[in-house]
Image (cartoon, rainbow, N blue to C red):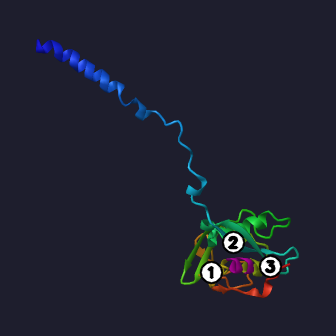
Amino acid sequence: MKKIWIAPAISLLMLTLCGCGTDILQKPENVPPKAQEEIPAQKNAKLTYYKVSSDASHIVPVTKSVIASDATPKTAVEEMIRFDRNSKYPFLPEGLSVKSVYVEDGTAIVNFSKELKNIQKGSTSENLLIAITVNTLTEFANIKKVKFFVEGSPINSLTGHNDMSQEFVRDTSLISDK
C-alpha cells in the first residue's frame, strides 16, 4: 500500500516545485532606470595645442575642452595634426600621425610616422614644426623638453637646418594670440 502512495506523492511534489519559481525568470515590470545622478559624470579639462598662423610667421595657441581622461600629450599632438590637416592650407605632411608620446624625467619623446620626413623643405618649415610640437607638449606641467623620433628611432636631421637629435625646450618667441 505504501508503494501506491509514493508515486503520486512524488508526482505531486514535482508539479508543485515546477510551478514555483517562474517569477524569478521574468523581468520586473516597474523598475525605474538609473537616476541621472547615479551615473558618474565625465570631468572636462582644457587641452592646448598650437597651429601655424595663416601667414606662417608665428604660431597660435588653440584651446579646446575635452574629457579629462583624453587630456594627454599624445592627444594634444593628435589634435595639433588634425587641426592642421583640416585647415585651408595644411602645413604638416599628408598622412602624418603620432605613434606615441613617452615622458621620462621631464622629457617627452614624440614618435611620429615616416611622413614627417615629407615636411616642406626650408628652415621656416622646420622651425615651425619644432615650435608647434614643443610648445604643445610643454603645455603639460611634467614636460620641460622634447625629443623627436620617426618610426621609433631618433632623428639627426629633418630638412638640414636644425640638429634634431637635441632636446628642445619651450620657446615663446614665435607665439602670438592673433
- Name the one closer to the observer, 175 or 12: 12
Q: Residues within 10 Å of mark 2 (few under 14, many from 20)?
A: many
Task: Check disc 3 and report its element: helix, strand or loop.
Answer: strand
Tag 3–tag 1 contact (CB < 8 Å): no
Q: Principal SS element in the magenta part?
A: helix
Residue 147: which numbered mark, if any? 1
- Name the one closer to the observer, 29 or 67: 29
Q: Amino acid at mark 3?
A: Ile
- Measured as percent of width and height from the top left, residue 118 is found at 74, 69
Residue 59: which numbered mark, if any? 3
Task: Check disc 1 and report its element: helix, strand or loop.
Answer: strand
Examine the rendering and report whether any part of residue 159 can be seen. no
Please report the bounds of the magenta region as a residue range.
131-136
Disc 3 from disc 1: Cα separation: 19 Å
Q: Amino acid at mark 1?
A: Lys
Disc 2 from disc 1: Cα separation: 21 Å
